[in-house]
Structure formats: C-alpha cells, structure tokens
Amino acid sequence: MKSSSKTTTIFAIVGAITCFYAVFSQYIIRLYVYQAPVWQLTINHFSFFTILTNLLVGVFFTSQIFSSNNKWNQFFSTPSIATSIVVYISLVGLIFNLLLRKIYHPSGLEGLNNNLLHVFIPLACIFYWYKYIPKERIKYKSISYWIIYPLCYVVYILVKGYFMHFYQYPFFDVDKLGYEKVLLMALCQLVVLTIMSAIYIWMNNKIVIKRSTN
C-alpha cells in the first residue's frame, strides 16, 4: 500500500508547486526577455518537451495529494502510468544534461528554473516513484503504449516547425539538418527511451519480487 503519511503528502505538495512554479515562471521570463508576439512565445514555450513533461509531472504530484480513494489518485498511482511518467521526465533530464547543457546555460532566476526543470524535478519524481508508488508487475509490452506520447510529440514539433520555422531543440531543426538527420536523431532518442523503459520495468518488477519475499 502507498504510504498516506504527512511526509508523503508534503512531498507531493512541494513537488507540484515546484513543477508549476518552474514552468510558469520560465514562461513569464520569456515574455519579458524575448521580442516576439505573445501568441508566438506562448506556443513555443508550451511546445518544449521539457515543459509539457514537467506539467505532466505537476499533475502527477497534484493527484497524489488527494485520498487514495480518489479516482484521479488511483489513475496516476497505477504502476504502469506512474512508471511511464518517470521514464519521460528521466529522458528530459538525461537529454538536457548530456546534449544541451553545454549550449544552453542561463543564469539568475532563469538558470534556477532550468535546473529545477532538468535536475531537481526529475530526481524528485524518481525518488517519489521508488518510495511511495505501489509496485505491481508491469509487462514489457507496455513500452509500446509508452512511446505514443514522444512519437506524437515528434510529429507535432515537425509540423509546427514547418509552419513557424522554429524548432524547440537543435537536433529537430529540419531547416539546418534536413529531415534525414532529424528523423535519425528522433529514432536514436526513441531507442534510448525504449531502453530506459525496459530498465524501469525491470527495476519495478525486481522491487515487487523483493517485497513479496519479505
């Protein structure tokens, strides 16, 4: 059973507040810093995989504040759903810190938000998943469902980029790289996501076995 202690609730509240603060604080900063129409800045900001996934994590943490009898809580506490969210936010942290940190290193409040979105929140979500989410065996075929979100994102970002000529990430910049290289990069990230998903499923199932024998 998932712990219902005050510590768990406080953790979820802090996690939710941090997610929404970082996402919308970064949005406000971009409105003031970048010279572009508000509608364009809004679309571009909320088209980052980082932003969308951190919003998803914020919703996940918010659901954990409610009673375990609440349907919203029950849905997001489902082992497969919770684990998929952890996979997505882990991918956010991994790709940024390996590929993007060297070319994007903001300072001040923007730098703080950047580290919240790409370091603190991913680690907090992983910890919460490990410590408080109930574990049941997950089948590896679940990965075929988990990749739908990132696949839809790639399609969306390419269609949006075609019309707006702005790509959220340099490895998706068709104008500079061409479709062949971009699709190859997308395939590589999909492979990484699949491997990460398999690792998390393996970890989840190992925990189930370990707890069942105690």
Image (cartoon, rainbow, N blue to C red):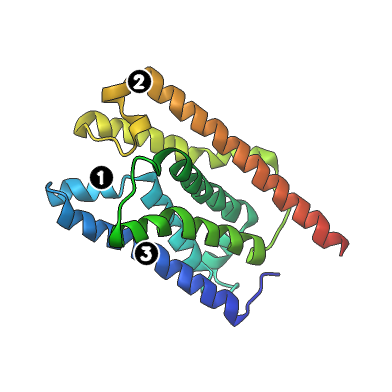
Disc number placed over residue 179 in the picture, else none = 2
> Where is residue 22 shown, x and y percent of the image?
35, 62
The three-letter code of the residue at mark 3 reads: Phe
Q: Residues within 10 Å of mark 1 (few under 14, many from 20)?
A: some
User: Residue tagged by mark 1?
Assistant: 44
Q: Is residue 20 visible?
A: yes
- Which residue is drawn at the image coordinates 39% and 41% (left, top)? 102
x, y percent for residue 183: 42, 24
Q: Where 50 sits versus 111, above or below?
A: above
Of the 4 image quadrants, the one containing the N terminus is: bottom right
Q: Is residue 198 left or right of residue 210?
A: left
Q: Amino acid at mark 2?
A: Tyr
Eyeballing the image, is 195 above or below 114?
above
Q: For marks 1 and 2, give the CA distance.
A: 20 Å
The answer to whether any part of residue 142 appears in the image is no
Of callouts 3 and 1, which one flags the residue occurring earlier in the amino acid sequence? Answer: 3
Q: Quadrant of residue 157?
A: top left
Q: Amino acid at mark 1?
A: Asn
Marks 1 and 2 in Cβ contact (< 8 Å): no
Label 3 belongs to which residue? 20
Who comes first in sequence, dot 1 or dot 2? Answer: 1
Residue at the image point whose x is 62% and y is 36% from the top: 195
SS label for mark 2: helix
Rate crowding at label 3 as few (under 14), some (14 to 19) or many (20 or more) other CA atoms within 10 Å: some
